[in-house]
Image (cartoon, helix red, strand yellow):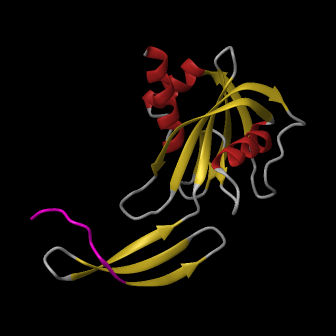
Amino acid sequence: MKVVEEPLLRKKVVYQGRYVRTEEQTVRLPDGTEAMREIVCPPDAVGILAIDKNEMVYLVRQYRPAIHQITLEIPAGIIDPGETEEATARRECREEIGLVPGRLMFLFSYFHSVGFSTGKIAVFLATDLTPSDGPHPDSEEFLEQVALPFNELYQKATSGEIVDSKTLLAALWYQQKRRA
């Protein structure tokens, strides 16, 4: 059977929290039957691969309760209502790693879990970094700033030590561009 769009018949919000909404969506399948889809709707976000002229990468280490694990990640954050992706990237660099990018270049965006989530992340490359007045994470964030050579980040990404998708993709993208 040919793959075609599944028309939305009904949608019901089953949970609305501070961060995420969950919906039950009833759709019509290509064979005419109905099916229920559970869709998670988080806000869109940005991630920032912050690299200085010596190819030092600035990351954050933090505990992620969803996976019960401490992770090493590129700085990232939710896009506030009315804020552009670029403004969010600049804000998150300053808040999470205490650096201000002189240059910010859009790299790519992706949906982080297309099977059940609407969440989209735009990833930027931040260069020409200058210190700000220090990191100022949100009150509920407990972050450790980490700087390491890009080659070390790439090794961690390819060895399986990095488990965060935006960090993996940013490291693989940057390595590919370095080789080109």
- Residue 34 horizontal side relative to residue 45, left or right: left
* Camera sees residue 35: yes
The furthest residue to the left: 1
Quadrant, the C terminus: top left
**In x, y percent, where is residue 3?**
18, 62
Would you place residue 53 above or below residue 123 in this image?
above
Q: Quadrant of residue 72?
A: top right
**In x, y percent, where is residue 120?**
51, 54
Does the segment drawn in magenta span residue 51?
no
Camera-nearest residue between 143 and 87 = 87
Q: Quadrant of residue 135?
A: top right
* Camera sees residue 164: no
Would you place residue 2 above or below residue 90 in this image?
below
- Residue 131 horizontal side relative to residue 59, left or right: right
Residue at image coords 78%, 33%: 99
The furthest residue to the right: 133
Q: Quadrant of residue 97?
A: top right
Residue at image coords 65%, 55%: 78
Residue at image coords 81%, 36%: 98
Residue at image coords 9%, 65%: 1
Would you place residue 142 above or below residue 34 in this image?
above
**In x, y percent, where is residue 100?**
78, 33
- Residue 123 horizontal side relative to residue 80, left or right: left
**In x, y percent, where is residue 41?**
51, 68
- Residue 97 horizontal side relative to residue 37, left or right: right
Q: In the image, which residues are magenta? A: 1-9
Q: Name the main secondary structure of what is drawn in magenta.
A: loop
Would you place residue 65 above or below residue 54 in this image?
below
